Amino acid sequence: MRRRDEGALQEALLEAPRVWHAVRGHLHELSGNFPAAGTAYADAARRATDVAERDHLVRQAARARAAELGRNGRFTERPP
């Protein structure tokens, strides 16, 4: 294996856990399991190396957790 190929493989392996957690969060969200989605998105955010990506994943986690609160009737809207 060439050294360049080894570097690409190492980079892909380092990114794999982060991507796996983000995809897992999305799939949990699609199935309606919002607590698991929020946890998976938060796990992916902790592994993110890019600030914009991390911020996006943090927002996804917050949105999933808010959806669960709203579904259980524990989420109340702020007064106008």
Image: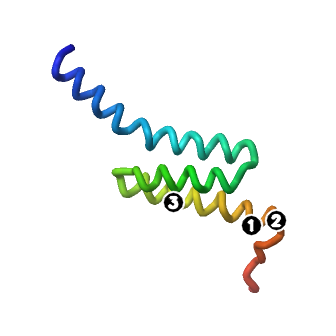
Residue 64 screen position, x and y as percent: 66, 57
**Colour mapping used in the image:** rainbow
Distance CA(mark 2)–CA(mark 1) = 5 Å
Q: Earlier in the sequence, mark 3 or mark 2?
A: 3
The residue located at (56%, 50%) in the rendering is 40
Q: Image quarter for residue 26?
A: top right
Question: Circle 3 — which element?
Answer: helix
Q: Is residue 56 above or below residue 14?
A: below
**Mark 2 vs 1: CB contact within 8 A:** yes
77 over 71 or under it: above or below: below
- Asked if 6 appears above or below 35 in the picture, the reply is above
**Quick one: label 1, few (<14), some, or many (20+) residues within 10 Å?**
some
Which residue sits at x=16%, y=21%?
Answer: 3
View extreme (left): residue:
3
Q: Residue furthest top?
A: 1
> SS class of the residue under badge 2?
loop
Image quadrant occupied by the C terminus: bottom right
Residue designated by label 2: 72
Front-most of residues 70 and 46: 46
Q: In the rendered structure, which amino acid carries the disc numbered 3?
A: Val
> What element does badge 1 sit on?
helix
Q: Which residue in the protein does label 1 denote?
A: 69
Q: CA distance from mark 3 to mark 2?
A: 22 Å
Q: Circles 1 and 3: CB distance less than 8 Å?
A: no
Left or right position of 1 against 45: left
Labels 1 and 3: the sequence-earlier one: 3
Q: Quadrant of residue 74?
A: bottom right
Tell me which amino acid carries mark 2. Answer: Asn
Q: Residue at horizontal 23%, vertical 23%? A: 6
| Residue 75 place in picture, x, y as percent | 76, 73
From the top left corner, tell me how far across and down residue 35 is, in percent.
Answer: 67, 56
